[in-house]
Image: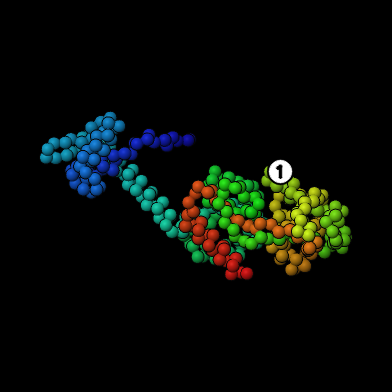
Amino acid sequence: MKQNFTVRQGALDGVEAFLSVAQHRSFRRAAAELGVTPSAISQAVRALEARVGAVLFIRTTRSVGLTDAGERFLARARPAFEELIAASGAARELGQRPAGLLRLTVPRSVVPILLEPLIASFCKAYPEIELELAASEELVDIAAEGFDAGIRMGQFIAPDMIAVRLTKPLPFAIVGSPAYLDRRGRPESPDDLRQHACLRLRRSNGGLAPWLLNDGGRSIEIAVSGPFIAYDFPTMLGAAVEGIGLAQVPAPLAAGAVKAGKLVQVLAQFAPMTPGVFLYYPSHRQIMPKLRAFIDHVKGGLEAAR
């Protein structure tokens, strides 16, 4: 059942003053502890009593005591206030050192080419951080879904986000299996692709992504056709390995299969460059140490691998 956690504006004003007076049984000593004047303490307590609707202290020229209402208020307010102080300390601690849950949304294609080699070393270097990766092609609202940041290709990042480059621009590669190329032949020009089985990518918005090519420095798009549609690059790559058709995927993703002889790159002279991979987070959000640690670790690992 949904609970209502709405707190009336100003409801906590004067609580700290009340607790200090209740502890010391003195407005003057409470003022000294909090670094304010006795008059300020008196005003804060009177305002609190007015909001509560009951007198909390019995005041005489010689002593200060609690009324029955004050005793009841103290019994509930003191543990609640201590919890607030503890919560503030816990939040402040996370704001000062790399710790806590770090939630990232990433495309499946980014995991093997960028994150898999670095996840183990990151978790070892920062044992107080819990790393949660949600692999999805959906362009989710990271703030609404509770993610600290997202990782995407540069062209898919909204302009109101702060983007941090993780990789240099990446080439795309058109690849096919040796069996497919033996059966259908190698394309020699972009026009030849119209005669081939080309695997396609369904974007998160429902549209089919065209293939991009670089023709002498001029970027061109080709609407290809073929027997298979995937929702992510790793699935498309697997279909190409099985000989279903040609696939256009990020070159680093296909590098292992090309090296193993499972795939062959074609039309390399027409390979386009993409902006590269970026981490992004809302521009209004202060970057937390846990996220800064992740960014520095990934960038350091990629530089060391070059």
Image x and y of residue 172, in percent: 72, 59
- Residue at the spot 12% in from the left edge and 38% down from the top edge: 61
Give above or below for 299 relative to 81. Answer: below
- Residue lying at the far left of the rendered structure: 62
Amino acid, disc 1: Gly
Q: How many marks?
A: 1
- Residue at the spot 69% in from the left edge and 57% down from the top edge: 274
- Residue 54 location, quadrant: top left
The quarter of the image holding the C terminus is: bottom right
Q: In this view, does 50 lie to the left or right of 109?
A: left
- Residue 295 location, quadrant: bottom right
- Residue lying at the far front of the rendered structure: 217
Q: Is residue 225 left or right of residue 70?
A: right
Scheme by which the image is coloured: rainbow
- Residue at the spot 56% in from the left edge and 62% down from the top edge: 298
- Residue lying at the far top of the rendered structure: 53
- Residue at the spot 45% in from the left edge and 35% down from the top edge: 3
Image x and y of residue 271, in percent: 76, 60
Q: Nearer the viewer, residue 287 or 178?
A: 287
Image x and y of residue 203, in percent: 70, 47
Image x and y of residue 84, in percent: 36, 46
Which residue bears the numbered disc 1? 206
Q: Which of 275 and 294 is in front in this view?
A: 275
Q: Is residue 68 left or right of residue 224?
A: left
Task: Judge the density around disc 1: few (<14), some (14-19), many (≥20) Cα neighbours within 10 Å.
Answer: few
Give above or below for 77 relative to 238. Answer: above
On the question of residue 23 being in view, the answer is no
User: Under tag 1, what secondary structure?
Assistant: loop
On the question of residue 173 being in view, the answer is yes
